[in-house]
Amino acid sequence: MTRLAMLLFSLISPTLMGTAIIVVLVAGYGTLKPILLAAAIGFVLALPASWTVARILYGARKSG
């Protein structure tokens, strides 16, 4: 399940980081600090998200 979570993390992390950066830019914060903070928040949020998705997919594979 760890390999599946790492694979999903490689897809989920840039998605959440990019979404957070777009939100910051649309909100009008165009300097370096808010953009880096948004990217870091997206990176950190991708960890539990990818683990949760991997657990759901792994459980669905085992039960079906």
Image: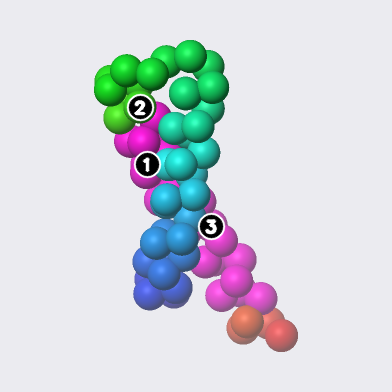
Foreground: disc 1 or disc 2: 2
Bounds of the magenta segment: 38-60
Disc 2 marks a residue whose amino acid type is Ile
Spatial separation of the CA atoms under disc 1 and disc 3:
14 Å
Q: Kindly identify which numbered label has been placed on residue 35.
A: 2
Percent x, y of residue 27:
53, 16
Question: Considering the numbered disc 1 on the image, is that residue within a helix, a strand or a loop?
Answer: helix
Crowding at dot 1, Cα within 10 Å, few <14 / some 14-19 / many 20+, comes out as some
Residue 60 position (above or below residue 44): below
Label whose residue precedes the other's in the sequence (2 or 3): 2
* Residue on which the image places disc 3: 52
Label whose residue precedes the other's in the sequence (1 or 2): 2
Label whose residue precedes the other's in the sequence (1 or 3): 1
Disc 3 marks a residue whose amino acid type is Thr
Q: Are marks 1 and 2 in contact (CB under 8 Å)?
A: no
Spatial separation of the CA atoms under disc 2 and disc 3:
26 Å
